[in-house]
Image: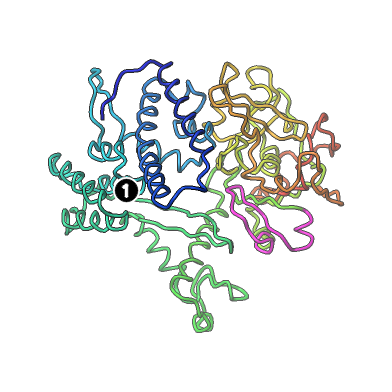
Amino acid sequence: MYVRAMSGSDVQATVTALRTAFDDMAACDVDLLTRPDLVAALDELETLGCRLPSVSHRLLARLQAEATPPQMGAKSWKEVLAVRWRISTSEAHRRLTEAAVLAPRQAMTGEALAPVLPATAAAQAHGLINAEHVEVIRKTMAKVPGFVDTATRERIEVDLVRTAVGNGPKELKDSADRTLFLLDQDGPEPDERERARKRAVTKHKQREDGMVDVSATLTPEAWAVWEAIFAKFAAPGMCNPDDPEPCTSGTPSQAQIDHDQRSLAQRQHDALLAAGRIALMSGELGKLNGLPVSVIIRTTLQDLESRAGVGVTGGGTVMPIAEVIRMAGHANHYLAVFDRATGSALDLFRTRRIASPAQRIMLIARDGGCTKPGCTVGAYGCQGHHVEADFAKGGNTNVDELGLACGPDNRSVDNNGGWTTRMNERCEVEWIPPPSLDTGQARINNYHRPERLLHPPDEPEPQGHNDTEAEIESAGSAQGNPRGDETNGPRPTDDAGKPGGPAPPGDQAA
């Protein structure tokens, strides 16, 4: 494909002409077209749609060479695309990955280099293959073993492109899978670096029934650890939730063993829960962002009283209220019910920069997670962010001037042309993008508080009817302070401008 040098004004004029041609096409009356005319037009549009990504890849690769994500006001190129075009991060990742292997490259010395997958890029530029073909080829080439030489690798790509031109994605994938199998029928020899690269524990999206799927690839060392734990706690009769008094130490009775109807998989699940609970109750896990490592759940006072509804953990997991109440019986979990005010001192003004444990619980109840729009990091991975003014510039460590933000987003706030934050009249943290990313998108993050979408901005959220003081149960109760370190102050009033800050919305509990 011939590429000619063009100035910025020439490219803009060409894009404008393309938009004009599309407008003309969209305005055409197609009611009088015959079947051959319709098919011919659809064929041309399909070919054009297959070719357009090749231009986007070149432009995106050039943008990455001309600027950096911080210069664009973001922490990564994935965020640049997701924020500016309002696409998902997975879609942004796909586009960036394709541009990396299909766009022309430039060597460090300045000379032009062919794309990583030149045959695929050429076929796409001519409209011979579609996006599904490209994805199959890209993923297949990424799986080609490292011992395959360059010439063989190039021949594999050409063969895949040739197959794609005359076949559909399903046939192409079948051919690609067979090629990979023939390349390495026995698999690679076990290698320590290869095992380390493949180790993973992945939590999948929570299902509609509340269950969470987890997949894992464990190293021999990791499985050896859990093998011993399962041998103890997953034995018949151990940690059985159906027993009135489950056996969690020692040896289960013969009756407990005989009445255990669980499968091995169910016993291992219950053993995993028991081992995690023991670790939490040990008090030896240290602190996470200022709070002892604990399970923190927020819900509403009405749901607690009615025994209905759900709670949400600091990591974003939705839990039935019955399980929330059951977990609240364990001393090392926090249950702080907020209704209008708390007994903790929540305003620290200039006395310290880092939010106190009581303030963090309040922020978790109010925000639920990172407040930057589009960020899915839960409260466990967030820091206390000074919203109106950074502490070094005179900001106060008061709960009505703080918001939750993950580390990268917290550091992205820059009043000199970067992201800025402010607190609106509803005590919601608003994020204002830099000019290069501002397309009028939402200023607040509703990911962690989807219930806000059910109430228009001018409609107040439901309020509670009881004034319940905060109750905090933690490992500190063993040291004679069951209410934490900051619960002996006077009870503040429900005034955002006075010490104590505003009550969390909707009578939230953490």
Query: Residue 261 versus residue 66: which sits nearer the camera?
Result: 66
The image quadrant that residue 246 belongs to is bottom right
- Left or right: 387 in relation to 163: right
Q: State the residue at coordinates (24%, 56%).
A: 177
Q: Which residue is mark 1?
A: 133
Residue 71 x %, y %: 47, 20
Judge whether 174 appears above or below 30 on screen: below
Secondary structure at badge 1 equals helix
Query: Residue 289 versus residue 465: which sits nearer the camera?
Result: 465
Q: State the residue at coordinates (44%, 70%).
A: 265
Q: Amino acid at mark 1?
A: His
The stretch drawn in magenta includes residue 302? yes
Residue 306 x %, y %: 78, 62
Q: Which residues are magenta?
A: 301-324
The stretch drawn in magenta includes residue 386? no
Judge whether 21 appears above or below 255 on screen: above
Query: Residue 317 versus residue 108: which sits nearer the camera?
Result: 108
